[in-house]
Image: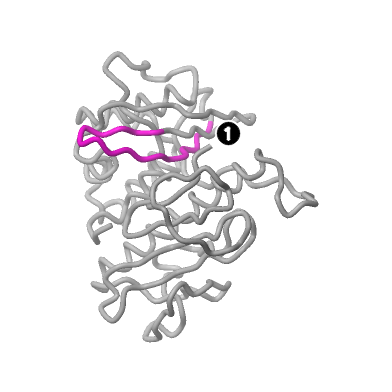
Amino acid sequence: MTSTNFMRPVLVLAATMAAACKPGGAGLFSKSPGDVVKAAYLAANEGRYSETEKYLSSAALKLVQSDLGALAGGMKGIWDKETRNGTIESIETVAEEIRGEGASVHIRIHFKDGSSKEDDEPLVKEGGQWKLTTGGAEKPKAGAASNKPPAKDDRAAVKRTMQDMRALATAIEAYAVDHNQYPPAACPPGALTGVSSPLTAASFSNLRPTYMQEVPWVDGWKRPFRYSLAMPDRNAYRIESLGRDGKAAPLVCGTTTSFDADIVYSNGTFIQWPEF
């Protein structure tokens, strides 16, 4: 991700949502969370930016309209990054989960250049309508005795992990706009970050509170994220979760079929993540 592209996580948090299926999608306030996600992406993909505001929760809209959102170019700039300048070809709803007044939609977006990406989009009910919102995904259930909990808990862990990685990347990219380089995780700011260094609760003090209030430093399995910088220029970064088993493994890039595989986010996009 370039320094002008740092708001992708804000999009995902603020407008976190779904894609421009094909024309003729759902109406303004669709009945299902998946329909709302698709309608929001469809509007943005077709350049109807003001319409997308109707699909955002009050918290998400506030975030988009904040100083951080302005740095990303406002509603138009944020959506153009997410839709890759209106080049979405189609979108699939892979999974939809509703929990009371909260929901999560897992989507797969296909672009006109033949590439695709996946995202988990959180929603909340406001005024009886589903709206895209900020915040993390469902947390794993407590009390799992096994080192390898059931698949449902692993899916929740993946969702939370990817959401927190995107949120952290938002702050990292915002820092880069101000400092023309990505931040080291260690303190003081002048200290260098080693290769795939595990984060601690004290990491990224240079991001707080200007770029984010609380820095997520553990993944959905309660293990530290790992962070690395391209040295000496600090012009590229990587955030990594070692997955369910907590063991580093060679990257295959793209989607994987194992919860044990590493989850990797680099320069604005996930380069490896589990598909379920």
**Picture coordinates of residue 87, whole percent (x, y):** 21, 34
Is 85 displayed left or right of 9 in the figure? left
Q: Is the magenta stretch mostly helix, strand or loop?
A: strand
Which amino acid type is marked by label 1? Answer: Gly
* Left or right of residue 99: residue 262: left
Question: What stretch of residues is rendered in magenta?
Answer: 108-124
Q: Which residue is drawn at 37% across and 49% down?
A: 10
Q: What residue is drawn where x is 39% and y is 64%?
A: 238
From the viewer's perspective, is residue 22 above or below residue 212? above
Q: Does 86 sit left or right of 63 as displayed?
A: left
The residue where tag 1 is placed is 102
* 179 displayed left or right of 205: left
Badge 1: residue crowd in 10 Å (few <14, some 14–19, many ≥20): some
* Quadrant of the rendering where the N terminus is positioned: bottom left
Q: How many labels does the image show?
A: 1
244 inside magenta stretch: no
Judge whether residue 116 is colored magenta. yes
